[in-house]
Every structure is written in structure tokens, then in C-alpha cells.
Image (cartoon, grey):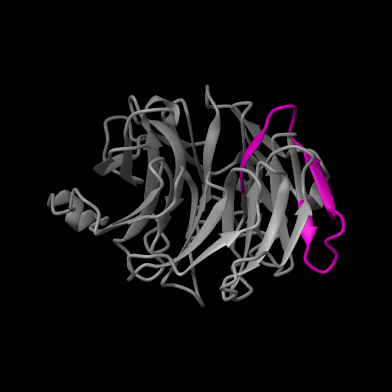
Amino acid sequence: MQTQTHTTTDRHGYSLRFSPFEANYLLLATSQLYGLAGGGSLFLLEQNSTTADGQSLGELCRLEWSDGLFDVAWCPYAPDIAATASGDGSLQIWCGLDAESATGQQTPKQPLICLQEHKNEVYSLDWGEKWNYHTLLSASWDCTLKLWDCNRQHSITTFVGHHDLIYGAKFSPLIANLFASVSTDGHLNLWNSLDFAGKPLMSIEAHASEALTCDWSHFDRNVLVTGGSDGLIRGWDLRKMRTHVFELYSGEFAVRRLACSPHSSAVLASANYDFTTRIWNLERGESAQEINAHHTEFVCGLDWNPHRAHQLADCGWDSLASVYTPQCLIGELA
């Protein structure tokens, strides 16, 4: 398995995202001191850059923030703009995140705009696509979610319905104005972004312990998945939400992040607190098809490359970011 890597010394990885426009670019959000104190750094990385060993990701630019960065999302309509979520309760929108600006040292060192309303850490960020491409969704440890227009300084709506820290929120890629969120209260909530009353459409107990991550299928508009500190991955169908439709067990440690493949309806990746990234194929049973253990700390970030079939990136608290194609999927590249 050929792997390209990048080490961010004294910065611990929390989230990474491939560019929706350029196959070789990705952003990496990191924090000092495991996010407990200190600042954060945003890295623009490039695949296939010219390096001595040929196996390293190139660092095109690095931007600094005064608090830890916990999530990152590319703008869906501008190839050089992205947003980050921070431990100080703010969102930052950055520009100049392209190779031409970076190599010419033209990338601004300060964000275009800083959005500050949350009272605690913002742990999750999603930028709307298709129907809501001006819309940002933030999820915070202040137990609220907020909807933002990226052209306005103040939020559009505050959503209240969780009773503990919110770890993740994602727009549905296939249903307009629908998003999901998960919290340490164990619940999965569904919301209508046009409901300015800010109350959930539905709330179910997805896990008996903390729910830490959720993601939507890119193929079936009714399917989404959740992961929790119980080590379980559960699948849900919007048409029958009384109970989960499948369950996978990844071990005794927490599932920190899930990513449904944009290339196969049956493939799913999980980032885990047992220092592994696991690849699952729902058509091949309930056991992980592959367990990658190249990290030496919690794995926190995970993303599939939308431009290259089955290419995956992950990052963790060991300051390592990796890009690779899982061995179990190489045979499906034909």
C-alpha cells in the first residue's frame, strides 16, 4: 500500500478535507497540545509534490489561529476558500488556499471574516452544497447548532435540542435543507434548515453512550450512519427510524469519525480511538475488511478523495496525516 504522509510537528491533527476542485490538494486542521491549550494551524497540502523520498505530501502554506482548530470545510463554489472551526467558539473563513497564491506567498495570513457567537468550542463544521452553497453549519460544545450565511456577520438560526456537547453535524447531500447532528447525550437529531424555530424534526437515542460522529450515504437518500464511544457503528433509514438497520462493532474504543464512500454504496471508513482506521464493506459482512494501524495516537480526521476512486486520507493526534488507497479496495479500481 503506497502511502504519502506529512508530519505537523507540535500540531495534532483533528480534521482534513480533500478539495472539491483539485484532486491533489487537501486541507488539514490541527491544534497544539492535543486541543487542550495553545493555538491551531491550517495546512494546505499537495499530493505528488517533488520530495527527496517521493512519499511525502508537500506543504504549500500554513495559516495560524490563536486557538485550536477542530474542523475544516472547503467552500463548494470557490476553489481557494475554506472555513475552520475553533476552540474559542468562532469560525474563520480563509482565502488564497490555492497553489498559485501559496507559492507566490500571496495567501493572506488573516481570515476574510471571523464569525463569533458560540460560547464554547466549535467541534464540527459543514458547508452546504447544491441547494445551500452559501450556508455554513456549525456544531458546538455549548449544546447548540448555528446556521450562517457566509456573506453575513451574524447567524441566521440557532438550533436547540441536544442536552450535551455536540460533536458533529452534516447536511444531507441528497435531500434539500435536511441535516443531522449527534451529541454526547447519545442522540441523533434531524433538522430542517428552513425551520427558523430551531427545533428538531426528530430525536432518537442512537447510542447508549456518547454519539460522536455521523455521515450520510452518497447513494441512498434515506441512509445515514452514526458512531459512538461504545465502539459501535449504526446505520439508520429515514423511513423506519425506530431502530437501526445495521450495526458494526469496531472494538472497545470510540469511533471518532465516519466517512461514507462517494465511490461505492457499500463502503464505509471509520477513524477510531484505538489508533486504527477501518474499512468496512456492507456487502461482505459485519467484520472490517481492513484495519490500518499506521497511527500511534487517536485517529480523528477522515475523508475520501472525490476525484480518485477509493483514495482515503486520515490524520491523528500523532501529528501524522496520510493519503493512501486501502489494500482491500485496490482490486476495485478497474
Q: Is residue 198 above or below residue 29?
A: below
Q: Is residue 294 left or right of residue 20?
A: right
Q: Is residue 256 magenta?
A: yes
Position in image of residue 177 (x %, y %): 59, 74
The outermost residue toward the top is 296
Q: Is residue 182 above or below residue 288?
A: below
Q: How many marks?
A: 0
Q: Nearer the viewer, residue 324 or 173?
A: 173
The quadrant the C terminus occupies is bottom right
- Which residue lies at the image location 70% right of the left edge and 70% below the top edge? 221
Provide the residue span drawn in magenta.
235-258
Q: Quadrant of residue 133?
A: bottom left
Q: Nearer the viewer, residue 56 or 70?
A: 70
- Which residue lies at the image location 44% right of the left edge and 47% below the top edge? 119
Q: Is residue 245 above or below residue 301?
A: below
Position in image of residue 3 (x %, y %): 47, 36
- Which residue lies at the image location 71% right of the left edge and 53% below the top edge? 188
- Which residue lies at the image location 82% right of the left edge and 42% below the top edge? 286
Q: Is residue 8 left or right of residue 106?
A: right
Position in image of residue 162 (x %, y %): 65, 52
Q: Is residue 59 visible?
A: yes
Q: Is residue 164 left or right of residue 297?
A: right
Q: Is residue 203 left or right of residue 160?
A: right
Position in image of residue 325 (x %, y %): 54, 44
Q: Is residue 170 above or below residue 323?
A: below
Q: Is residue 226 magenta?
A: no
Q: Is residue 331 visible?
A: no
The quadrant the N terminus occupies is top right
